[in-house]
Image: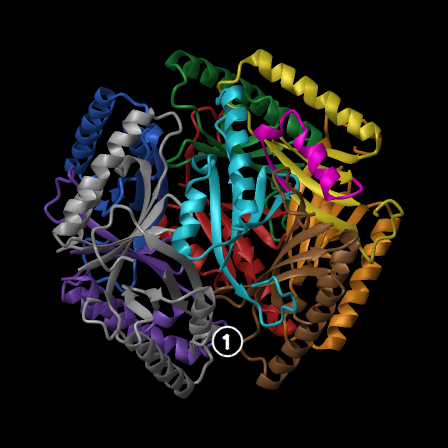
Chain colours: A green, B red, C orange, D yellow, E brown, F cyan, I purple, J blue
Amino acid sequence: MLFHVEMVVKLPSDMPAEQVADIKAKEKAYSQELQRQGKWRHLWRIAGSYANVSIFDVSDNAELHDLISGLPLFPYMDIHVKPLCRHPSSVHQGDA
Amino acid sequence: MLFHVEMVVKLPSDMPAEQVADIKAKEKAYSQELQRQGKWRHLWRIAGSYANVSIFDVSDNAELHDLISGLPLFPYMDIHVKPLCRHPSSVHQGDA
Amino acid sequence: MLFHVEMVVKLPSDMPAEQVADIKAKEKAYSQELQRQGKWRHLWRIAGSYANVSIFDVSDNAELHDLISGLPLFPYMDIHVKPLCRHPSSVHQGDA
Amino acid sequence: MLFHVEMVVKLPSDMPAEQVADIKAKEKAYSQELQRQGKWRHLWRIAGSYANVSIFDVSDNAELHDLISGLPLFPYMDIHVKPLCRHPSSVHQGDA
Amino acid sequence: MLFHVEMVVKLPSDMPAEQVADIKAKEKAYSQELQRQGKWRHLWRIAGSYANVSIFDVSDNAELHDLISGLPLFPYMDIHVKPLCRHPSSVHQGDA
Amino acid sequence: MLFHVEMVVKLPSDMPAEQVADIKAKEKAYSQELQRQGKWRHLWRIAGSYANVSIFDVSDNAELHDLISGLPLFPYMDIHVKPLCRHPSSVHQGDA
Amino acid sequence: MLFHVEMVVKLPSDMPAEQVADIKAKEKAYSQELQRQGKWRHLWRIAGSYANVSIFDVSDNAELHDLISGLPLFPYMDIHVKPLCRHPSSVHQGDA
Amino acid sequence: MLFHVEMVVKLPSDMPAEQVADIKAKEKAYSQELQRQGKWRHLWRIAGSYANVSIFDVSDNAELHDLISGLPLFPYMDIHVKPLCRHPSSVHQGDA
Amino acid sequence: MLFHVEMVVKLPSDMPAEQVADIKAKEKAYSQELQRQGKWRHLWRIAGSYANVSIFDVSDNAELHDLISGLPLFPYMDIHVKPLCRHPSSVHQGDA
Amino acid sequence: MLFHVEMVVKLPSDMPAEQVADIKAKEKAYSQELQRQGKWRHLWRIAGSYANVSIFDVSDNAELHDLISGLPLFPYMDIHVKPLCRHPSSVHQGDA
């Protein structure tokens, strides 16, 4: 089941550089593990902002919440979720 | 080059049913032709609304505008465009 | 799987009274059938507005979209959907 | 009398972890006590956010305010309240 | 129990003058009847707009909805409702 | 002359508890003095929020500004002002 | 007593040209009469829009409402009112 | 050439009282100097807020920016600028 | 003197095709005449929308208003104006 | 390929003056280098605000993101990007 997730990162301006580097490294590892498992199906940067558009493929709402709330950057992001489903005009196998 | 496009359809409530059916059929054909050409890479329905999230793969801004403004439903949609690029954490070949 | 759906009805002011009565009757029948099936789990009026708050219990996003887009009033409503999941502090059996 | 309450939690990023854990524990206890009393009738997590949707069942506006303003997290939440009443199409006994 | 209600009137620009006069007369009679019954406790014009601020005194949410949705102008108004309760600093007997 | 004033209190999360108690006590005394003088005609709590709706009765805009800007909580509130006047349908002597 | 009034004109696109010309002529005459009486103290066009910024000088809120609601274009304008008073730093005699 | 400028002051809640007094004194002196030169033609307080509405009379956009960005409170204000021009219905000599 | 102007075109859905073609032709001719005169210095399409971003070079606010309000599409556009001036970091001769 | 970029600078009010001066100097050097390379084609100040409107000329979305995210002030700016393309009515060679 697919969900559209948009994440905008807003780090506090007084967070120490070392802590920033650490949390970003953890975020990257966490994200890549989920991508490899097939749960984080797409991940794009929005050009010009510290933000991304993602497509998650999960079994239900609860799993979606677990994955998102486990993000190391979760406390520092504005996150918007939209449930997706197959579009009747789509010809792509993967759009479902 | 990828673009994130969100389209919300707002047909006038007094459009005759026949015209509605006709414009939807044309929209579907137009959309499927672009999907087959690889230019409209993804197309998802947003669950619960007459709206979609799409990913376009075009050579430049001008081609993006030509494709979108040629949509039969173009005069009846609210459309928001965001330029995308590869996310440094993405492991998917196709996210670029 | 639960979804929170808020619907605000906006009928065109020039819709004939007979058509209004007809579409409302169809909406009521449709809604009550889904409630009896257990798919439309709660339905409340928002006091002071022509709007409701609903909780849907469906198997996935696709079923949610089918049910909502099949509403007779669908073309005349602003609809907002939020995916829900069990809250770790909930003690109610039914909140899942 | 039912009220729809949406709460979004926004903890200051510099609140010490111990204080965060303490206030969350108090919130959970407070919430579960009200749920057991039947005053906090439903409590759902909004998937993907640190937020919830709740249904309160109170005797009047004053009791609603007392319960909400007594929440340990009250100073750290954006809260929106909507009065509910029975929907004429509802078939559920409990939707009132 | 008190509720704060703000109403903004938006009549369709093509409503015939006679119908406008008729609906306004009905609205006035309806409003004055509720005021005399003590249910519509205050009614003020917002200077410079076709809008009012009102205080309703009703027994519960359901009665509030019945009174508001029965307004002859109901289909032509944007209406916002806020539940009120006694303020701990109020010295006025009537503010409850 | 009447004005509708809505005040939402937003205290900094790091204000010491003693200072909070002190400023609230001053606010209460200030408010009650104005209520006794008849200048702060109504004061209601908005249920579920740290906010109020008030009706001021002053001789002109300048007096309104003096009273509001003299509030001990003035630097910590979002304040919206609307000028009121008698509604042609009001039957209440006091609504003017 | 001064009020800041911003008016944005939104004529229905299907209003006959003759009616447009007529209502504009009436608006001009009405406005100029109030200006000559000293009640409409300033009137500026906002460059690039069919809108104006005005300063009214009236005896109270009720007179402000009478003047504004009497505007021939009143049903076709979005109007925002702000009460003004003398600024402590102003050196202009007329800013009061 | 006239510009409409609205300024809303938002001082950080932790700015020392002495610094607040100092910056306000500088702002007042700066403002009054510009008023005496005729460049800051009007200055009104918006009743109930720490905000003002001003009319500037400058030779071009660049001078407007120099004057506004030189305000001692510039870093602590939300500022909105609208270019003005003579309204065809204005009868006031000074409205240009 | 430069101004940034963003225009979004919203034609009524029931405007006859012939009238649409006519007004677009007039708009094009009007726009190109101003471009040739050097008053409409830049004109770009916003990709994916029926909208443009423009830079006008005029002698004052009044000329800006005359040019914009003379646009054949003026009654059918949302228009936002921002005054521009030379940026201290610009190295381009033409950015002034 | 052209992009419209609007940047609003929001420096934390507690950033030391020396650090402010340093970051502004770096921003200026970075910006001027990109302007000389032809990638930052236009740069204007928005009169009355600490903000600019810019036109970038880049080969694709990825280059746009690299240039913007490399700005020394990037963590302290609200940035909005719009893809541009040639307008069919433009007569300027450079508008593409």
Tell me if residue C32 comes above or below residue D54 in the rendering. below
Query: Observer-nearest residue: C68 or D86?
Result: D86
Tell me if residue C9 comes above or below residue J45 in the rendering. below
Residue C35 appears left or right of I25: right
Stretch in magenta: D58-80
Residue F9 appears left or right of J35: right
Determine which residue is flagged by label 1. I14
Residue that appears at 24% across and 21% down:
J19
Circle 1: is it few (<14), some (14-19), or many (20+) Cα within 10 Å? few
Percent across and percent down for residue A60 are 71, 33
Percent across and percent down for residue C16 are 70, 77
| Image quadrant in which you'd find residue I34 | bottom left
Residue situated furthest left in the rendering: I93
- Residue D60 in the magenta stretch? The answer is yes
Query: Observer-nearest residue: C65 or J77?
Result: J77
- Residue F73 in the magenta stretch? The answer is no
Residue B60 seen by the camera? no
Q: How many marks?
A: 1
Residue situated furthest front in the rendering: F37
Query: Observer-nearest residue: C4 or E69?
Result: E69
Query: What amino acid is labelled 1 in the image?
Result: Asp
- Secondary structure under the numbered disc 1 in the rendered image: loop
